[in-house]
Image: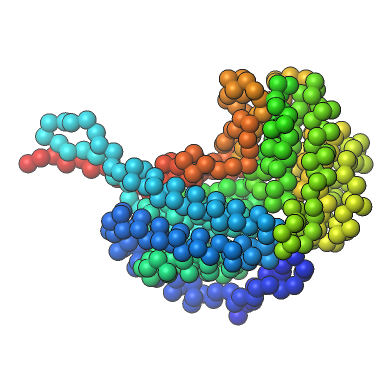
Amino acid sequence: MGIQQTISPVDGSVYVERELAEPADIERALERAVAAQRAWRETPLGERARRCSAMVDDFVARRDALAEELTWQMGRPIAAGGGEIGGFEERARGMIALAEEALAPIRLADKPGFTRYIAREPLGVSLIVAPWNFPFMTAVNAIVPAIMAGNTVILKHSAQTPLCAERLAQAFEAAGLPEGVFQYLHLSHDHTEALIRDPRIDHVSFTGSVGGGAMVERNAAGRFIATGLELGGKDPAYIRADADLDAAVPGVMDGAFFNSGQSCCGIERIYVHREIFDAFVDRAVAWVRQLRLGDPTDPDTTLGPVVRPAAADFVRHQVEEAVAAGAKAWIDPGDYPLSTPGSAYLAPQLLTGVDHTMRVMTEESFGPVVGIMPVDSDDEAVRLMNDSDFGLTAAVFTRDIAAGEALARRLEAGTVFTNRCDYLDPELAWTGVKQSGRGCSLSRLGYETLTRPKSFHLKHA
């Protein structure tokens, strides 16, 4: 039997060790999920909402313990851990509230002698593959609406954050969710792929890398099942000449460095109008220098390690290549004694003198680094922002909201912001373009991906 180990980025120790599911375990989970779904789909929506709400109540009641486990599993500073639990609650309760309207039949205009409507039916068994970087908030995007829609769920969580799956299961059990409606499995890559190919899986939700998304598509090919793929980004921000720097600098810098830059919708490249470029850079450098890199279990730490040493070294190489090609690094890594090659602790970095020939401006970094370029016009900013293989989110900072909205319409992204970034609103569709993925979660539209339409055309006798 295979063993899965979680190496904590805090100190390199083995924090969690779990046995991987064997084929017999997977078969039992599938049988339970299929059997449970037959009854769950007939359960009234109000009862589904009651169980899911009770799950959220139990979950948030354990906020402090969950935040501490998150710190040890993936390195986020303990001071920020509660935000993940709050975000989970906001999204879960938001999707519960939207369910009645989203799942209601579509009634058509009266037609004498006929009753006509379109209902939304659950797909069946949903396999949800969740990542480590926001392990509760990304998982809940699919779990709660899938269950509210009448599906059953099998969760495969990242090997870095296996306790997240177990804690969700405990909360659902405390809420009295019927057996088999929510299950988790710790799986190898091979068994995950085999599960996607199993004919009893009716839907796959995956959040992760582009390569992981391609894996899902390969294994789902020819089965004609629904898939939702959220695959990351290289998200840009544009600071117009009229922007309020007092708000724009902390807003966009937090969007770049929160969670040590390990966010699919984090800001990874910034374009600033040349008229305010120097002022922006001065303030941005000062903001970065106040970050405290250290032990994430210390409440005073504001920047924790990245998930593993290899991820830190990947970012270091991006920065080194950019500097060798002419970029200027504004932060001295020597000011951060913990940041050494081969360590998961990585000094933050801000680069100018960058361009789109450099990997740091085109390839997802997923670390605490951002490149800043001056632009001479809105048109130049839009061209550079759209010059990417990704399109998850994009942000424009400006005092002129009409101009910001007009620019947002031209940006190739699933979500566009003005004067904020790096945020998911449960009432808005979460989606991407290009290599940021396909499908949709959250909002009323998110329920459409977890159900199928069924038309009723009833002629009266």
Along the line of sight, the residue nearer the viewer: 251 or 451: 251
Using residue 48 as the reference point, say whether residue 419 is left or right of it: right
Give the quarter of the image for residue 296: bottom right
Residue pictured at 30% horizontal, 54% vertical = 46
Residue 425 position within the rendered picture, expressed as x and y whole percent measured from the top left = 52, 41
Residue 29 position within the rendered picture, expressed as x and y whole percent measured from the top left = 44, 71
Residue at the extreme left of the image, as rendered: 461
Residue 224 position within the rendered picture, expressed as x and y whole percent measured from the top left = 44, 50
The quadrant of the rendering that contains the N terminus is bottom right
Residue pictured at 75% horizontal, 56% vertical = 301
Inspect this view and state whether residue 283 appears.
yes
Using residue 349 as the reference point, say whether residue 262 is left or right of it: left
Residue pictured at 44% horizontal, 74% vertical = 28
Q: Tell me, what colour scheme is on the image?
A: rainbow
Residue at the extreme front of the image, as rendered: 300
Q: Is residue 101 above or below residue 73?
A: above
Give the quarter of the image for residue 234: top right
Using residue 94 as the reference point, say whether residue 79 is left or right of it: right
Q: Is residue 4 above or below residue 292?
A: below
Along the line of sight, the residue nearer the viewer: 5 or 257: 257
The quadrant of the rendering that contains the C terminus is top left
Inspect this view and state whether residue 315 appears.
no
Q: Is residue 206 above or below residue 426?
A: below
Give the total number of marks visible in the rendering: 0
Residue 88 position within the rendered picture, expressed as x and y whole percent measured from the top left = 52, 54
Along the line of sight, the residue nearer the viewer: 195 or 311: 311
